[in-house]
């Protein structure tokens, strides 16, 4: 039986980026990354927010105590591939740590998904990673 992520990835690809279920109504991208420990290639569905030409993703992990694996993996990457709708894009990866820029982008994500991050924030003391994905070329 396919894992939950594998099912979401298959649905995303079959429907040009549109999925239902738990992700219904959310704008997703498929993030390609390499496992930091295993070295295995992975594809993970992640909620996205477009800010200008960039895509911003937040490592909320549903408010869990730990960062999601994808956030740890991309922290050591400078470039990767994402799928958005029916497009595949090469992107530069940068974790946003500068406080003013991080807060600006985080506010954009909060606006895109009202109440979601606020709910997750009540479940943990962890600061969620904010990652900017900038299309190359």
Image: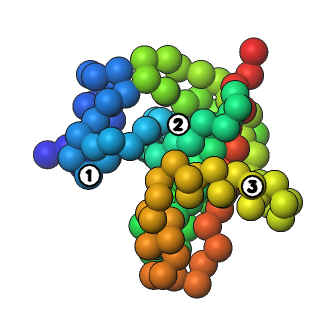
State the separation of the CA atoms marked 2 and 1. 21 Å
* Nearer-N-terminus badge (3/1): 1
Image point (21%, 46%), residue name:
21
Q: Examine the image and state in which quarter residue 56 appears.
A: top right
Asked if the residue at tag 1 contacts the one at tag 2, i.e. Cβ–Cβ closer than 8 Å, the answer is no
Counting other residues with Cα less than 10 Å from the Cα at mark 1, is it few (<14), some (14-19), or many (20 or more)?
few
The label number, if any, that marks residue 89 in the structure image: none
Q: Nearer the viewer, residue 43 or 134?
A: 134
Image point (26%, 52%), residue name:
22
Disc nearest the viewer among 2 and 1: 1
In this figure, which residue is indicated by the disc labeled 1? 22
In this figure, which residue is indicated by the disc labeled 3? 104
Q: Secondary structure at mark 1?
A: helix
Above/below status of 17 relative to 40? above
Image point (14%, 46%), residue name:
1
**133 horizontally vs 39: left or right:** right
Above/below status of 91 relative to 114? above
State the separation of the CA atoms marked 3 and 1. 27 Å
Disc nearest the viewer among 3 and 1: 3
Q: Nearer the viewer, residue 27 or 42?
A: 27
Total marks placed: 3
Give coordinates of residue 13: x percent, y percent: 33, 24
In this figure, which residue is indicated by the disc labeled 2? 32
Give coordinates of residue 126: x percent, y percent: 60, 78
Give coordinates of residue 36: x percent, y percent: 60, 54
State the separation of the CA atoms marked 3 and 2. 25 Å
Q: Secondary structure at mark 2?
A: strand
* Nearer-N-terminus badge (3/2): 2
């Amino acid at each position: 039986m396919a894992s939950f992520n594998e099912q979401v990835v298959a649905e995303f690809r079959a429907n040009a980026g549109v999925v239902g279920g738990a992700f219904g109504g959310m704008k997703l991208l498929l993030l390609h990354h390499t496992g930091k420990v295993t070295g295995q290639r992975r594809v993970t569905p992640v909620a996205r927010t477009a800010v200008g030409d960039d895509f911003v993703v937040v490592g909320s992990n549903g408010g869990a105590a730990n960062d999601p694996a994808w956030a740890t993996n991309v922290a050591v990457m400078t470039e990767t591939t994402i799928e958005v709708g029916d497009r595949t894009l090469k992107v530069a990866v940068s974790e946003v740590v500068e406080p003013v820029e991080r807060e600006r982008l985080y506010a954009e994500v909060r606006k895109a998904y009202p109440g979601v991050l606020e709910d997750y924030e009540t479940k943990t003391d962890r600061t969620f990673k904010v990652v900017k994905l900038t299309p190359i070329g």
